[in-house]
């Protein structure tokens, strides 16, 4: 069990990390440019991340539905149609949001270039989830690795050839590649699928997928939306260098958190295939989650100086300290989403993900308040404490369900088998 979860988790994490590491690569290349370029990209990209995370959250149900034995070929076609609808709607909403928040802003050009890449990203994420659930995780990992390398290469070419600012060049590279690799993964799906793939639409299946992803999407919207609002608010008062420093830190947080998201997806896939979830399974998963999160977090903390240098080549002082402290945010949240994955598969898909809203209710307001006095360190500490609240609530809820449900105890399961 442990080997299976870790192996698939690492592959899915790698796939998600590479697929969504493009903003990280962009930030690293912009770190060699001006602080103004970094700041403009930061504000625009934080708002875009709201819609990117929404796309991922609304696709959570695919990894739960596809592994089930009764999944039909028509369901696969309808899932692709679902991803297309999600991409179209989110693109429209993002365009309207740009008019509302970034009209006349220096970040506007970067934002609208990135908006154009949301639709192909939705299709890419949907098909990737289908292929991963069908056992083609390595194929997806390979294609996303090529995508990441291509992004760095195209960034370099466009920055040095186009007569525009660097932030516009890297944004254009990201959008171009999302269309290119969306087409490539569609062709790969056609090649590997045993049935003919078509685009279908099913209200019933869409409702099912929305049910799985609804609470996660609500949480993610407020989660990433609050961060976007925070940057939007601070951009009106903080200096360009402070915004650039904070932008790099949150770029690091967003990128590394994908590693823990991939692990939770692996847990979801594994648990979805089990008829009964026993107490011994829960114990092993909790211990495994602790080991996975702690080992990666300690590694990131140890190499915080090197990570800072990789981003901006020591152009922003204090960045290494911010990155080291921000690992707390990622680690605590990583443990929380692992427990939430267990609860979601067990039949509690709505309430547990909402625990993470403590980040919005407590973390952002208190963080903005302390930012005026303690800078980035005060902000990061408040966000870590907010995630600790979500983790505590998740632990308490899981313990409550374990005490109430006989499905979690080996003794009661064995009694049921004896009765049969």
Image (cartoon, rainbow, N blue to C red):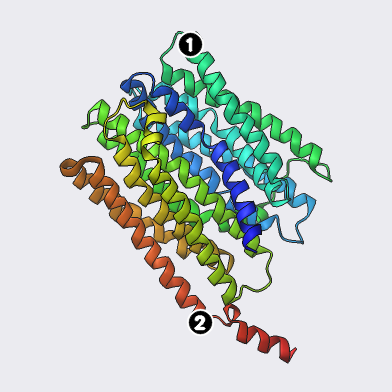
Numbered mark located on residue 241 in the image: none
Q: In this view, does 43 lie to the left or right of 204?
A: left
* Residue appearing at x 27%, y 50% in the figure: 381
Q: Is residue 164 above or below residue 11?
A: above
Viewer can see residue 207:
no
Is 296 or 392 nearer to us in this picture?
A: 296
Label 1, residues with CA under 10 Å away: few <14, some 14-19, many ≥20: few
Look at discs 1 and 2 and give the one toward the viewer: 1
Quadrant housing the N terminus = bottom right
* Residue appearing at x 68%, y 68% in the figure: 274
Q: Where is residue 155 in the image (x, y as percent from the top left)?
A: 51, 20
Quadrant housing the C terminus = bottom right
Q: Name the residue under label 2.
A: 404
Q: Is residue 346 left or right of residue 51?
A: right
Furthest residue in direction front, as rendered: 302
* Residue appearing at x 24%, y 31% in the figure: 236
Q: Quadrant of residue 267?
A: bottom right
Viewer can see residue 407:
yes
Q: Mark 1 points at which residue?
A: 160
Q: In this view, does 305 lie to the left or right of 10?
A: left
Q: Position of residue 165 (x, y in %)?
A: 41, 14
Q: Where is residue 309 in the image (x, y as percent from the top left)?
A: 38, 30
For the residues labelled 1 and 2, the Cα–Cα distance comes to: 63 Å
């Amino acid at each position: 069990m442990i080997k299976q979860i870790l192996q698939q988790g690492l592959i899915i994490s790698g796939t998600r990390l590479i697929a969504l590491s493009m903003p990280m690569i962009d930030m690293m290349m912009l770190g060699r440019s001006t602080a103004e370029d970094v700041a403009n990209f930061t504000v625009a990209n934080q708002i875009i991340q709201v819609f990117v995370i929404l796309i991922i959250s609304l696709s959570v149900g695919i990894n739960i539905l596809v592994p089930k034995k009764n999944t039909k070929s028509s369901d696969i076609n309808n899932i692709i149609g679902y991803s297309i609808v999600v991409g179209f709607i989110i693109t429209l909403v993002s365009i309207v949001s740009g008019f509302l928040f970034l009209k006349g802003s220096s970040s506007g050009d970067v934002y609208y270039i990135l908006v154009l890449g949301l639709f192909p990203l939705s299709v890419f994420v949907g098909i990737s989830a289908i292929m991963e659930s069908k056992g083609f995780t390595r194929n997806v990992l390979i294609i996303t690795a090529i995508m990441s390398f291509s992004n760095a290469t195209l960034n370099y070419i466009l920055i040095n050839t186009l007569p525009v600012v660097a932030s516009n060049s890297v944004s254009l590279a990201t959008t171009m590649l999302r269309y290119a690799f969306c087409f490539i993964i569609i062709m790969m799906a056609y090649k590997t699928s045993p049935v003919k793939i078509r685009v279908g639409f099913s209200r019933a299946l869409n409702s099912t997928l929305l049910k799985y992803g609804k609470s996660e999407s609500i949480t993610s919207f407020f989660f990433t939306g609050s961060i976007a609002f925070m940057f939007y608010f601070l951009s009106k008062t903080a200096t360009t260098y402070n915004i650039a420093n904070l932008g790099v830190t949150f770029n690091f947080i967003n990128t590394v958190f994908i590693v823990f998201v991939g692990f939770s997806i692996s847990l979801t896939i594994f648990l979805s295939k089990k008829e009964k979830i026993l107490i011994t399974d829960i114990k092993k998963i909790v211990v495994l989650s602790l080991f996975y999160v702690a080992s990666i977090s300690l590694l990131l903390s140890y190499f915080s100086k090197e990570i800072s240098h990789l981003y901006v080549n020591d152009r922003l002082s204090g960045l290494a300290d911010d990155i080291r402290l921000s690992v707390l945010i990622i680690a605590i949240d990583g443990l929380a989403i692992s427990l939430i994955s267990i609860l979601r598969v067990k039949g509690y898909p709505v309430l547990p993900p909402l625990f993470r809203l403590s980040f919005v209710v407590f973390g952002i307001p208190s963080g903005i308040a302390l930012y005026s006095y303690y800078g980035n360190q005060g902000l990061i500490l408040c966000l870590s404490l907010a995630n600790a609240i979500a983790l505590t609530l998740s632990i308490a809820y899981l313990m409550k369900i374990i005490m109430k449900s006989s499905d979690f105890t080996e003794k009661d399961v064995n009694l049921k088998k004896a009765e049969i």
